[in-house]
Amino acid sequence: MTQIIVLPHVELCPEGTVIEAAPGTSICDALLDNGIEIEHACEKSCACTTCHVIVREGFSSLAEAEEEEEDLLDKAWGLEPQSRLSCQAEVGDVALVVEIPRYTINMAREGKH
Ligand code: FES
């Protein structure tokens, strides 16, 4: 199992947490399996950006993003060089530190910030 440190997110996990996932699991599934209800508006089919996460550590251990993912990421709220769509990024065997951005594009549009 690979460790994932999830940094605090105001609503989804206010204190932050540490979870474990089997290599090959998507980061999105790993979060959901552990009760962290990250948005996944397109049901993990790489068609939205609501599952955006920033991989603060361990980013280079992940398989590179496909073009489709990169194109979508360009539209994500708070894009950073270590951004990934969590439904597309599979956990490897290196521990990760993951940050869930404060907003998704859905929330930003609704003006909740
Ligand atoms: S859930 Fe839509 S791209 Fe990941």
Image (cartoon, rainbow, N blue to C red):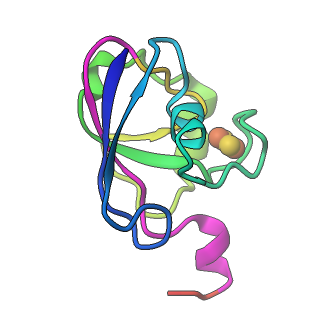
The residue lying at 24 percent from left, 27 percent from top is: 58
Residue 61 vs 9, above or below: the answer is above
Q: Position of residue 49 (x, y in %)?
A: 62, 50
Q: Position of residue 63 (x, y in %)?
A: 42, 15
Which residues are the magenta region? Answer: 92-110
The residue lying at 29 percent from left, 29 percent from top is: 59
In the image, taking residue 53 as reference, residue 16 lies left or right, namely left
User: Tag count in the figure?
Assistant: 0
In the image, taking residue 19 as reference, residue 36 lies left or right, namely right
Asked which quadrant contains residue 72, the reply is top right
Residue 74 vs 77, above or below: the answer is above
In the image, taking residue 12 as reference, residue 111 lies left or right, namely right
The residue lying at 25 percent from left, 24 percent from top is: 95
The residue lying at 26 percent from left, 17 percent from top is: 94
Which quadrant: the N terminus? Answer: top left
Q: Quadrant of ligand 1?
A: top right
Q: State the residue in front, 93 or 1.
A: 1
Q: State the residue in front, 74 or 47.
A: 47
Whether residue 20 is in magenta: the answer is no
Residue furthest toward the left? 57
Q: State the residue in front, 46 or 32.
A: 32
Residue 14 vs 87, above or below: the answer is below
Q: Position of residue 74 (x, y in %)?
A: 52, 49
In the image, taking residue 45 as reference, residue 97 lies left or right, namely left
Q: Position of residue 15 (x, y in %)?
A: 31, 64
